[in-house]
Image (cartoon, helix red, strand yellow):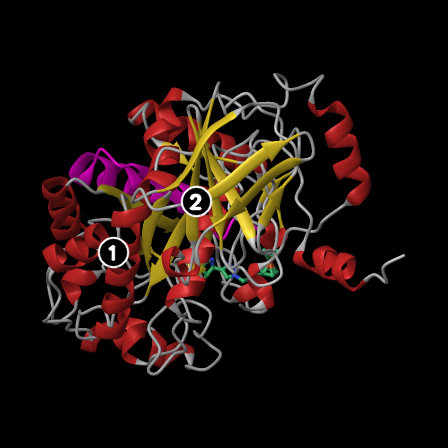
Amino acid sequence: MKKMFITRVFNPAFAGLTLLLGGVLALQSAPATPDARLKWWQEARFGMFIHWGPVSIKGTEIGWSRGAQVPVEEYDKLYLQFNPVQFDANAWVRTAREAGMKYLVITSRHHDGFSLWNTRHSSYNIMNTPFKRDVLAELSKACREQGVKFCIYYSLCDWWHPDYPLGSPGGRSKKPSPNMERYVEYMKNQLAEIMVRYGPLGIVWFDGEWESPWTAERGEDMYRYLRAMQPSLIINNRVGKARKGMEGSSNRGLFAGDYDTPEQRIGRYQDTRPWESCITICQQWAWKPDDKLKSLPQCIQTLARCAGGDGNLLLNVGPMPDGRIEPRQVERLKEIGQWLKRNGEAIYGTRGGPYLPSTNIVSTRHGKYIYVHVFDWQGVEPVKLPPLPRKVKKASLLDGGLVEWSQNNSGITLQVPFVFRDKINTVIKLSLDGSAMDLATIPLAQAADVKKEQTKPKK
Ligand code: H79
């Protein structure tokens, strides 16, 4: 597994303190009760991100390649050739559903300013391509019909729009006569149009908030504006200015929307405020020919790591210029769905913990159950877990398979016969004599520590 997937740093001092205080503070340190409005989304755990637009013709990155790999004049004319005749909204949504994804977030408008729907507020939109079909209309309908929550990505920066002050990343080029107030009105009009026509939406997923024209005040105003229109709406932290880099967490005290958004990395364990990692199934957000595809173990372990850290995974695909999602990506998504059919109980509707994610093992919990996810048995066999202030009544595999287990004062030992193991992630279900939900987090030794322990000279 690539290093970028492992972001949690083990801090022994903190771990010791957690152990010490664990018993005393068990109730206070239990996962925070989610806001009722966010419940469906937190329980869903897994969604599909879609980055798409005329740029897929070039196979370069959406937004960022404008004025870089593709000259601005050429980039802004690509829509005149955009004709994804094989686009089938039902097929996309079926792919998401079969992957076990419960919601779908599409780039209604990325930093390049192109609108994927029939907007009356800009002519730079899908109806003025040879395709002339409203992608958001078709997708939102397919989502409604198939029971997948329809959500949109919407960029707060627009390097194309004459009213937005900056013309390229970081403002290397500027617009001659910008008008930020008018631009904000434009965004509000576009968003209202989407919400009225294609709503109710699950999420509005903002981005591009780090650029200087956007302010915390504008963010709070936008948040209130959208929630007033649709009270049940969920809005990510990028509506405001509180995000800390690509880690995606929010600075305490600053206005931060509803949830945190680590990008291209797995969020660290955080059960006090919801989060969702957005990660590409290949390398690029938009489609790129022969882009390197993540392996099935990488995908499944990434999802389990997110759930184990009490977060969601928004896995991105970039459909091709002909309108199809690449067959090999569809195949990978199907494989994820097959794993989830057998193991979904350990992902959907769970919270992270109580064991903190480690190199090889993460845990999720629901009611009186803890799900121990073991990725790789090498060096951790049999699995030894620290003491738990609950009695284990039973340990089993999700299909009822055999688990050899024991519990005593020094902890829990788990062993699964080789033939019953899942090469990617073996899930062991512990049935407890009481709730797993009010347990404080418990650190696990990292594989590196285990190795050190094993190689220590025996006295
Ligand atoms: O839409 C996809 C990307 O095009 C977009 N977000 C995902 C979902 C994206 N945003 N940023 N990046 C990609 C990489 C850019 C990072 C930086 Fe910054 C922008 C470095 C400096 C400014 C934001 C602010 C991250 C660190 C500080």
Does the residue tagged 1 have its C-beta within 8 Å of any atom of ligand 1?
Answer: no
**52 on left or right of 370:** left
> Who is closer to the viewer here, 49 or 238?
49
Q: Residue 242 at what x, y percent from top left?
A: 61, 40
> Who is closer to the viewer here, 323 or 411?
411
Of pointers 2 and 1, the one earlier in the residue sequence? 1
Type of amino acid under label 1: Gln
Q: Residue 261 at what x, y percent from top left?
A: 51, 46
Kindly identify the residue that appears in the image at 72 percent across and 49 percent down: 10
Q: Residue 77 at what x, y percent from top left?
A: 28, 76
Gap in angstroms between the C-alphas marked 2 and 1: 22 Å
Q: Which residue lies under the disc numbered 2?
A: 403
Q: On screen, 429 above or below 282? A: above
Q: Which residue lies under the disc numbered 1?
A: 338
Type of amino acid under label 2: Val
Residues rendered magenta in the picture: 182-210
Asked if residue 386 can be seen in this view, the reply is: yes
Q: Nearer the viewer, mark 2 or mark 1?
A: 2
Asked if residue 212 can be seen in this view, the reply is: no
Kindly identify the residue that appears in the image at 57 percent across and 29 percent down: 272
Check if mark 2's residue and mark 1's residue have beta carbons within 8 Å: no
Kindly identify the residue that appears in the image at 29 percent across and 36 percent down: 202
Q: On screen, 329 above or below 81? A: above
Q: Secondary structure at mark 1?
A: helix
**339 on left or right of 456:** left
> Who is closer to the viewer here, 382 or 369?
382
Q: Residues within 10 Å of mark 1 (few under 14, many from 20)?
A: some
